[in-house]
Amino acid sequence: MKKRELEKFRKLLLARRSAILEELGLKKGSLGSTVKEASGDLSTYSYHMADQGTDAMEREKSFYFASKTGRFLYHIDEALRRIEDKTYGKCLGCDKDISPERLEAVPHARFCITCKEKEEQREAAENR
């Protein structure tokens, strides 16, 4: 891959990484707070049972999304590492070039379309 193309993908990955970090920063306050702190209510009265359930569900959802976002961030960091190693754009499965169209859509892609389909089929068969 040409140096100019690598720089284009590096900038795209860095922009996505920055957006993810900003998004995580916005959610950070809701992840580490107690129910009382998250609600902003400083009264000492107890919450209704339904309110506590809703708050617990929202906190669990926040943890789930943060975990998923963390994995996405890891894949972006790995793609940036591959750019530095000069291995970016090569399929980890068959060592062929990943199409530029795929990299435009999924700049952190590790596999070409063929190898990714095989991986997904294998995972689907294991989950049956």
Image (cartoon, grey):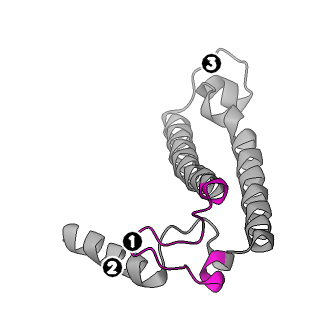
As measured in the structure, the alpha-carbon distance from the residue carrying label 3 to the one carrying label 1 is 58 Å
Instruction: Answer whether labels 2 and 1 touch (C-beta < 8 Å).
Output: yes
Where residue 94 appears, x then y in whole percent? Answer: 39, 76
**Position above or below: 8 against 77:** below
Q: CA distance from mark 2 to mark 1?
A: 10 Å
* Amino acid type of the residue tagged 2 in the rendering: Lys
Residue 101 belongs to magenta span: yes
Tell me the amino acid under the disc marked 1. Answer: Gly
**Height in image: 14 above or below 24?**
below
Q: Position of residue 66 (x, y in %)?
A: 58, 45
Type of residue at label 3? Answer: Tyr
Q: Which mark is residue 45?
A: 3
> In this picture, which residue range is highlighted in magenta?
82-103
Instruction: State the mark number for residue 93.
Output: 1
Q: Quadrant location of residue 9?
A: bottom right
- Depth check: give the residue in front, 48 or 37: 37
How many numbered callouts?
3
